[in-house]
Image (spheres, grey):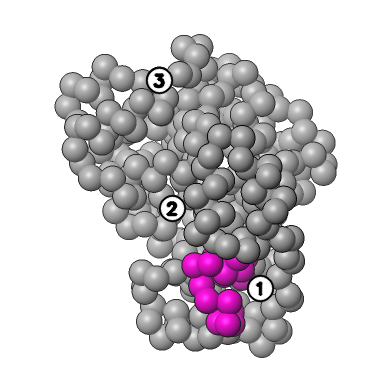
Amino acid sequence: MGDSQTARRVPDFLIIGAQKSGTSSIVKALSTSPQVWITPKKELHYFNRQIDAPESWNRYCDEFSQAPSNCRVGEATPDYLPKPSCARRIHDALPQARLIICLRNPVDRAHSAFWHAKRLGHIPRSMSFESVLDRDTREFGSPWTNIIENGCYSTQLLRYLSLFPEEQIHLLLFDDLLLNPGEAISGILRHIDRENSPEHHLSEGELPHLNEAQRWILPQLTKKLLRLPRGSRFVRKTLTRRELPPRMEASTKQQLIELYQPWNRQLEGILGRSLEAWSA
């Protein structure tokens, strides 16, 4: 990346995960603060997809070129947390970056991720959550969906903690975000800009809810049309249907609770707090 990195605007902070853990709502809330600028395009995927070439880095930096000079800039890509190569790549490129990580009960996260992928056509509609669970536990680490592995948070966090000082990483729980969104968002803002200590005033129930449970009727066509200027509202109205996922089977939930126990216990040590509620 060389000299081109110092000559361009680079992100001050990254929201790196976890997937299906409120990152879109966090972005929406932060974007209302005058001290923060987040790329209009969510999930740039630079550190988990792009090659290390000068032109690629320049295109990434161009995403931040329109940001005002008097604010902190950043982007949100939840794939950065679970992908093994991202921690090193981010540290090499942005060693001073502040990282924000929101973690959701991995059992609920896996169920939500499954239905999200299914609605978008990434998983056959005939395939059940239990069949994906069976496949992913047998073929742990499968690159197809990684629905189960993406909830093994302690393994993912330790990669970042081995490279970044603790003070550069802000960890919060999805439960806390829902319970007290104002305090959670203010905590993120203070982490992003410790000099100005900005506050964000959100009362309970005011956290923006994005990524609603909508099924894409024609996934490939819908994805293309949503990219068109001013086409989003029409497409969402005509080619999507609201679809709430069914409740998880009790036996399936218990299986996942037991599967995640080793990682959750290790995560308790990292966070310094009990996660017993995740086993209920």
**Residue ID at (53%, 67%):** 121
Please name the residue shown 70% across and 53% down the image: 238
> Which of the 4 image quadrants contains residue 129?
bottom right
Q: Amino acid at mark 2?
A: Asp
- Label 2 crowding class (10 Å Cα cut-off): few <14, some 14-19, many 20+? many
Of the residues shown, which amino acid type is indicated by label 1?
Answer: Ser
Quarter-wise, where is residue 6 in the image? top left
Between 38 and 66, the one nearer to me in the picture: 66
Marked residue nearer the N-terminal end (2 or 3): 3
Q: Is residue 5 above or below residue 172?
A: above
The structure residue drawn at horizontal position 49% and vertical position 31%, both measured from the top left corner, is 39
Q: Nearer the viewer, mark 1 or mark 3?
A: 3
Stretch of the chain drawn in magenta: 109-129
Mark nearer the N terminus (1 vs 2): 2
User: Which x, y percent locates residue 14?
Assistant: 45, 37
Q: CA distance from mark 1 to mark 3?
A: 45 Å
Where does the C terminus fall, quadrant-wise?
Answer: bottom right
Q: Is residue 234 above or below residue 132?
A: above
* Residue 22: % across, % down: 63, 49
In the image, residue 136 above or below residue 25: below
Q: What residue sits right under mark 1 in the picture?
A: 279
Question: What residue type is disc 3 on?
Answer: Ser
Q: Which residue is mark 3?
A: 65
Residue on which the image places disc 2: 79
Residue sitting at x 50%, y 36%: 41
Q: Mark 2 or mark 3: which is in front?
A: 3
Cα distance between the residues tagged 2 and 3: 23 Å
Q: Secondary structure at mark 1?
A: helix
Residue 85, horizontal then vertical, whole percent? 29, 53
Binning the other alpha carbons within 10 Å of mark 1 as few (below 14), some (14 to 19) or many (20 upward) gives some
In the rendered structure, the answer to whether residue 65 lies left or right of residue 242 reads left
Q: Are marks 2 and 3 in contact (CB under 8 Å)?
A: no
